[in-house]
Image: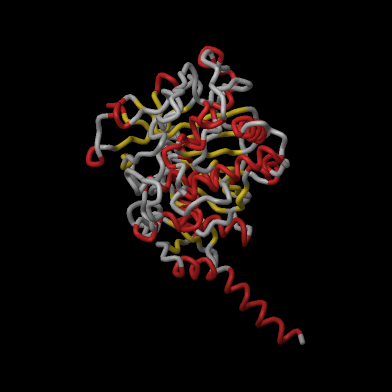
Amino acid sequence: MKRSILPLIIFFLSFFRLSANYLLVPMDDSQTDHLKSYGLVYWMLSEHDIEVDWLLNYRGGSFMAPVAQILINECIIRNISYEVISDAEADQIIGIVKNPDANMDDVKLQKAPKIAVYTPKSAQPWDDAVTLALSYAEIKYDKVFDDEVLDGKLPEYDWLHLHHEDFTGQYGKFITMRGQTWYQEQKAEAENTAQKYGYQKVSQLKLGVAKKIQEFVLGGGYMFAMCNATDTYDIALSANGLDIVESPYDGDGADINADAKLDFSQTFAFQNFHLIYDPYVTEFSDIDHTSRERKVNEANDYFDLFEFSAKWDPIPTMLTQNHQSVIKGFMGQTTAFKKQLIKPDVIVMAENRSLDEARYIHGTAGKGFWTFYGGHDPEDYQHYVGEEPTDLNLHPNSAGYRLILNNVLFPAAKKKKLKT
């Protein structure tokens, strides 16, 4: 009996581990599919409890782990470039990134974060770049919305993405599209939920949700938002108890003095901004750097990633890992953030210097972290409602989408004393 079991043990050991070598997943221009590489790392963490080294600033932010045939097979299936290297080569790489003179570092990724996407049940496939990225990379996530948030489900998760959402209760200010089925469905969904939880208005419902999300972050959660989920979230927090919604959306007029009563101590990112009350203008405040003000077009719209110290500022370094330092710009209902309205303790991670605008910002709140990324879809310059969703099979090396997936892996990093 023992003789029959021993060959099986040897077979399985050889299947899951090849000698003492390592698997290197390069994230520079040699990588065939950057986006699926993040999914591979998530799969290693979530399905196999394999600790992964994230080699910050080494070949575009490469990944390294003990090699196993099952990992090689997965790379082949997902069309991911990989290299099998020896123990000595792995030690040499660690020596390079740990060198005090090199702006590199090694961060251990240990546990896959549990991911939630805040998104309405009536969301359309063209609505949100993050769900496209997660699906393409094959990273598991749960959908939550107002019910789950108000019912206290957020502490079950580590990472929360805010779907393209208007937290002011004005339905995205898309009243000119009120004849569209999707608009009617989302409006009815919001009104029914408000009534269910005893709120008189949708704006009050969304404020209640925003506060629950604030509690999640303050308690140690990670929040990532794009497009108008960024500025409307802060606007909702600052307008606590104020009526900033005009009658076409809630049946009565806004408080004309609300602008002077905003409480910027409650916001994560922005301060000293002014509201835009007009119900037919699809802007909520002057935070957003609008297309009319920006004076650029698709051909010359780019933004630059900052380079941070990997050893002293590991968080923004993780969040800016990329094979490109200049990123193709893209628009959204909220495209970019006016730098003069950003709080001084916020870290600007990408900007368009010529326009004096920030595109990608990060900060801390309590025990948690948040990141705001302007624009709607990194591979759809001027996204229109109702368009077909972006096919990421056509953009496997998207530098703009990589910034999204950096945020997904960030909570998996081994906790240590950080400077930011």
Tally the numbered discs: 0
Q: Where the N terminus falls, by quadrant?
A: bottom right
Query: For residue 350, what is the image quadrant?
Result: top left
Q: Is residue 241 left or right of residue 257?
A: right
Q: Quadrant of residue 198?
A: top right
Q: How is the image coloured?
A: secondary structure
Q: Residue at x 60, y 28 (%)?
A: 365
150 is higher (above) or lower (below) than 5: above
Horizontally, is 400 left or right of 311 in the view?
left
Residue most toward the right? 1
Q: Report if residue 307 is visible in the image.
A: no
Residue placed most toward the observer, 324 or 99: 324
x and y, in percent, of residue 357 in the image:
36, 27
Res 209 visible = yes
Q: Is residue 201 above or below residue 31?
A: above
Q: Quadrant of the C terminus?
A: top right
Residue 12 pos. (x, y %): 63, 75
Please name whichever residue, 199 or 228, is drawn nearer the observer in this view of the structure: 199
Q: Residue at x 43, y 55 (%)?
A: 35
Q: Nearer the viewer, residue 59 or 364?
A: 364
- x, y percent for residue 135: 50, 57
Residue drawn at (55%, 45%), measured in percent from left and top? 186
> Residue 338 location in percent, x, y?
39, 24
Looking at the image, the residue that sits furthest to the left is 299
Q: Residue at x 51, y 21 (%)?
A: 345
Give whichever of 333, 108 is nearer the camera: 333
